[in-house]
Each structure stands twice: as C-alpha cells, then as structure tokens.
Amino acid sequence: MGTINISKKYTAREKAYLPAILIGMKITLKRFIEGFLFRKSFTIMYPEQKRTYSDRFRGMHFITVDPTKTENCTACFLCETICPADCIHIVADEREEENNPYGVKKEKKPVSFDIDALRCCFCGFCEEACPKDAIKLSGNYELAVSSREEAIYDLDHLKRNMNGRQEKI
Amino acid sequence: MFDLSMMMAKIVVILVGTLGVVPVMVWFERRGAAWMQGRIGPNRVGPFGLMQPLADVIKFIFKETFTPRGANKFYYLMAPIIALIAPLCALAVIPFGSKAFVNGHEVILQVAQMDTGVLFILAFAGLEVYPVILAGWASRNKYTVLGALRGSSQIVSYEISMGLALLSMLVVYGSFNPHDMVSWQQGSLGFIPRWGAFVNPIGALIFWISIFAETNRLPFDLAEGESELVAGYHLEYGGMKFAAFFMAEYVAMIMASALISTLYFGGYGILPGMEFAINLISNFFAFGEVGMQNTKAVFEFISLASKIAVFMFLFVWVRWTLPRFRFDQLMDLGWKILFPIALINLVVVTIGVYYFNS
C-alpha cells in the first residue's frame, strides 16, 4: 500500500483560468435569462403551496378510528414497549360493554394515550408493532408548536379526522 | 452665488444618484442571485419585491445600537463613516458630462475640477483599506482582526497592479485630468470606438480584476469569508452601522464602475449611434447651439450611467459565478501573475506610445 497521488498536472488552458471563468459565466448568464425572462424556478412558495411527500413519510402520529369514532387501540402496550425513545405513555382500562360494538374484540381501551413529540424520533416502530393498525404516522410535517405542552399529543388530538395518511383540511 | 448653487446642484445629483442606486442594487443582487440559482428571491414586499430594501432599512433603524465590551468606541464608530465617505469623495472627480449651459453660463459637469483628478481618485480608493483595519481592530474580536488582516493585505497588494494598469493608461493619455482622458477616447479606430480598453486590453483586464479585490467583492472577498471568519471585519457591527458598511460596499462598486468606464470605456463619451438621436431631437425642437449642447449633456449622462450599469451587472454576475479564492491563491494571483503582467504591459505600452508619437 503506497500513497496514492491524486494531484494532476494542469494544462495551459486550465492554468490560464480565464477560459474556465468564461464557461462558468456563460452558464450563470443562461440561468439568469431563464429566471428573468422565462420565470423558471424550482421554488415552492411554501405557506401557500405545500410539498407532498410520499405515503411512506413519517410525520405527526394519529390513531385510526372505526365508523363509530371509537379508537382501534386496545391498549396492548406493544408500542410503548418497543418505543426506543420512551415517548408513548398509555393508561389502560376496561371498555364498557355498550361502547364495544364488536363484542369481545376491543375489551381494553386507553384512558389516556400521550405521545411526547419532543422525545419521538419518528422511527415508525410503534406503527410496525401495532397489532390493530391503530397508531400510524401521517404525512404531516408541520410539527411546530409554541409551547412544550402542545408537543405532547393526547388521545383527542391523535383521534383527529384523517384522509388516509394525509391531514384532512 | 451662481457657482455655489451649481456646485450644490452637482453634489446633490451625485449623492442622490449614488445613494439612490444602492437599494436598487441590493434588490438586484438578491433577485439576480435567485434567478441565477433557479430560485425566485424576495418578492413579497411591493411589486416584484422592490420595497424589500425599504423593509430592511426599517429593520436596521429599529435595531439596538450596540458597542461590544472592550471596543475602542471612537474608532469603532469611525470605521463605517470612513467606509461610506471615501468612495463618495472619489466620485466627486468623475465627470458625468462635458458641459451644459445654464442661464448662459457654462457649467462643467464634474463636482471637483482638478488637473490631478486620477491621483485624487487613487488616494481615496486607497483610503478604503482604513475602514477594514479600523473596524477589525477596534471591535476587539479575533475574527474581525483576522478579517482585517486579510482584507488589508489583499487591498494593498492589488493596489499595485491596479496602479500599474492605470499608469499604462496615463502614458497613453498623457494627462491626469479625467476630461482630457474622455476627450482622447472620442475618436474611432476604424469600426470600433477609440476606447482605452481597445488600445490597451491587457491593462483594462488587469484593472478590472483589481477592482474586484479593491471593493472586496467575490471572488476576492476574503475579508468577510463567512465560512471561516463568521462575517469578517464587520462581525461586531449591527443595525445602521452594519447598513453603512453594506451601503459602502455598493457605493465603492459604483465608484469603481465609474472609474473603469472613465478610464477604459470612453467615460461620458456618447455611445455609438447616439449622435443620430441627438441630431434628431435638436432638429425636431429647433435647438440652437445651447440647446444642442444641453441635449448632448443629457445623452452623455445616459451613456455614463449605462456603462456603469453594465459594470454593476458584471459585479453581480461574477459574484454568483465564481467561488472564493484561497488566501495563498489570491496572493499568488496578485503578486506572481498580475503584477509582472502589468509591469510588462506598462513597458510595452510606453514603447508603443513613443513609437506612435515620434
């Protein structure tokens, strides 16, 4: 193993430097004309115009609900167990018979289901662990909040109306 | 009284013209950069974002006036003032027209008529080192001192090749007076105008490269290399004091563009084809000699302004094309390439002038 010498001898044209400058300036002039005359740009005017990510994007969490607006979660604690960031906190309880349209299918319910988004690393393990497909990560990437308390998503927030994986507007 | 009022009028024209162009240039710099990079740029404030500099100024005014602890307050406040005044003073000697007639009096369109005009410009262009050094040293910060060191050594070394390129032109014109230079460039060399840049192209190129270094613009803005020096010599400045530095950069650009137009590109000499327009307007309104001269003065001002505009565009264009030089490369270019070429060019031009004149 010797040293690999990656330096090279420059040709006279490269040493003169001016031809390379002219080529570069030709490119920027082309871009300038494209932008100035033909209004070509790759900018997304963000607040008005939003970028859509693919369905595999992992954004703000939500919990799926059935047609009677009952959450699919059965408080099995699998997500809380697998969570590497310890950000899910569930308090479980028994579900009342009358609120349980499917008989024995949803015997347990979460009394509170808190996700601390400030701790969350958006790995998506909770989604994979969930046997009921209840907890999911949406395509919503606007997670900014004005206080730390707002970053803790409670059950009401997680059960919000969704359109597939996208937020319902 | 008449002389005084005319002098005031000329000063106002220069000041308003220069300082009025600065916000437009700031806007164009940002918008042009965006266009070159496939972005849109500031477009929220006013039509096409033209009010953006105004919004910036309002923000600057309401910022806290802050002096860092341990700073030398006198020199700290002095630096942005010198930065702004030096290029404005140099602009006083640049003629923006031959002459006009006001109330039957002849008025020479230049603020300060000096036979040694170019030396005056060089002196004040040289003063641009001082704000860099003062700002860097007085704000008591390691990064600003490093920026000042780099900036001052860069400006001093490029001043030599700039001076030599200028000297080769002085040999050709045989005068220090900008008016004489412009009138020398009035003729034509066959189908091209007899501009200094066509007589002495190497000198023009060296001068053009040097003014980038003189005005601290990319690719030579080592004094404010963001990646290694945070912001360079004006790191500790905020609010209007920073705005003064920012404006000074653009005023220096305008001064440098006006200087290179006067020395190498015919100055206020009317652009080819404009003579036709002057004759047309004069004949249409049946102007006498006075009216004709005044019309010509207007067109001369337009010619100089358009030449300056071209060089301002070149400043922006080059800035968003080339990456910054490394410091040793910068010094190599200045001392090992530009300086010898400028020296040889001076000798060649001197021999040529001697040959042609005898």
Image (cartoon, coloured by chain):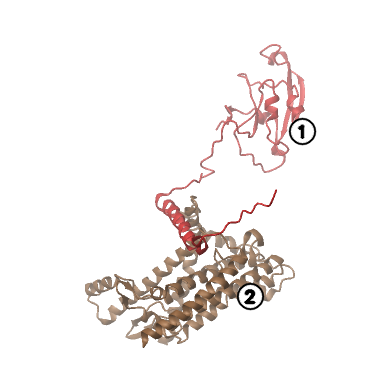
Can residue B89 be spotted in the picture? no
Amino acid tagged 2: Met
Per the rendering, the colour in which chain A appears is red
Tell me the number on the disc at residue B272.
none
Can residue A106 be spotted in the picture? yes
- Secondary structure beneath label 2: helix
Q: Residues within 10 Å of mark 1 (few under 14, many from 20)?
A: some
Q: Where is residue A16 drawn, in percent x and y?
A: 50, 64
- Secondary structure beneath label 1: loop
Q: Chain of mark 1?
A: A
Q: Which chain is brown?
A: B
Q: Residue at x 76, y 33 (%)?
A: A86
Amino acid tagged 1: Asp
Q: Where is residue B176 drawn, in percent x and y?
A: 45, 85
Give the residue at the far front of this rendering.
A1
Q: CA distance from mark 2 to mark 1?
A: 57 Å
Instruction: Please tell me whether residue B328 is drawn above or below residue B200 in the rendered image.
Output: above
Q: Which residue is more in the foreground, A124 or B286? A: A124
**Residue B179 found in image quarter:** bottom left
Instruction: Please tell me whether residue B300 is drawn above or below residue A74 in the rendered image.
Output: below
Q: Where is residue B217 drawn, in percent x and y?
A: 54, 66
> Which of the two discs, 2 and 1, sits closer to the camera?
1
Check the picture and name the quadrant holding the N terminus of chain B. Answer: bottom left
Question: In the image, B190: left or right of B84?
Answer: left
Instruction: Please tell me whether residue B85 is drawn above or below residue A22 in the rendered image.
Output: below
Quickly name the residue at label 2: B78
Quickly name the residue at label 1: A86
Q: Which residue is more in the foreground, A36 or B229? A: B229
Tell me, yes or no, whether dots 2 and 1 are on the same chain: no
